[in-house]
Amino acid sequence: MVVIKWLWSHPQNRDLVKEFLANPFCRFCAHGTDEEALPFYQQLAIQDYYYLLAHVKFKALRLNSIPDHDVTRMKKAAKSISTSAEAAEYWLNICTEKLGITESKIKDTPRSAAELGYESYLHSNTTKVTWFGLHIIMVPCYYGWRRLAQELSEDPETKKNTKFYETFIEKNNTEDSIISLNETLNDGYSQWKSKELEDRWLELFRRSLQMEIALFNDALKTSPNLCPIATVHVWGTTYIFSSRDGSIVYRKTRNNPNNQDWKVITQTDDTVFSERLGSSVFSATVWDEQIRLYYINQHYLIRELCLEKENGDWTHGALTGQKFKVLPGSHLDAISTKELRVSDKDHVQIKVIFVDCKRTVWEAYIEKGEWHRRIISRPTPAQVENQANAR
């Protein structure tokens, strides 16, 4: 898988690859029950159906980029159009038979802004990009979804008795869909390769990966419920956190999985959770009489929300001070909390890894209740030079 792996592991693409694999939509659906996640997954499934229809038309338009007299490639490409049409039909059946979406619901749901943008991007490039480049565009969809499914399958927090696991993780955790793409790219590499084109391929790969990330993020925003920011399980009850109208809110699902009664925890100026960063960066921990929710707001501030138990419920919350500011213009890669050491409340194990605008990798972490920051790695001279040339 020479070309695909070159694209996926290229240093220039690491930021987007990490963002794609850590997207909050798929993590939420993988970790949640059908009651929690299915309404959100249904929204993605509908948009994915529209994407598959657009993909059929994209393949038809892509025929024009095949060099004259290459009849063998034309025959193979024409056959793949029919295969893609069958894939769209198959996914429609999954939507109606497995996911409980009626055909009328699908027809009444408009294409999202992200899907329309992706469709326009695909079709417009058929008149600008070579046959080889138009296959590079497909790598994030074909190979990316396979890698995403593989990671979710290996995640110990993933629930394996859900519709999402059956129809997304299992369906995509196979190499069947990338065999043909891999052969096309490896066979055509020598014919199309050049330094100038390689730069263009990297650009196409990054743009396509951004389109994929946008689809996942858009599925959260267009869902019938509020966007899930974090989920905590306490004594058989699931608490789902979100934001609405300048307030942090939550709902609980115990004894009523479909409960939509959102309770306000506290007023805050954080009207969105890291929306400017392109993905929701969050984590939550629980122990004794307290839940702590960590997130990064639109002002690049790491915030901590502490929920104290009151009258048998978690209804009182308070925001801590602004303890740590992420550099404006930086790109956040990931946030992780793997349960704390329960020796005392200062030993919360939380860290934030991010890359600033100069490509320096930082780690923010809590030590004895205070935020600290340290450099993990700096860009190489070659990376600095490439960045300067790009500007």
Image (spheres, rainbow, N blue to C red):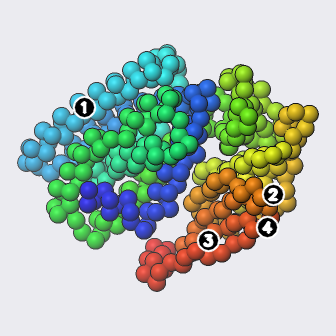
Q: Are marks 2 and 4 in contact (CB under 8 Å)?
A: no
Q: Name the side, left or right, on which 351 lies relative to 100.
A: right
Residue 374 falls in which quadrant of the image? bottom right
Q: Name the side, left or right, on which 299 lies relative to 40.
A: right
Q: Position of residue 84 (x, y in %)?
A: 28, 33
Residue 362: give its label: 3
Q: Earlier in the sequence, mark 1 or mark 2?
A: 1
Secondary structure type for disc 4: loop
Residue closest to the far bottom? 381
Q: Name the side, left or right, on which 187 lies relative to 357.
A: left
Residue closest to the eye, 165 or 179: 165
Q: How far apart in space, not on screen, are marks 1 and 4 (Cα)? A: 58 Å
Q: Amino acid at mark 4?
A: Lys
Q: Position of residue 299 (x, y in %)?
A: 74, 59
Q: Amino acid at mark 1?
A: Thr
Residue with the mark numbered 1 = 83
At horizontal 30% and vertical 66% (from top left) the residue drawn is 198
Task: Indicate whether 384 appears above or below 231.
Answer: below
Residue closest to the eye, 116 or 331: 331
Residue with the mark numbered 4 = 368
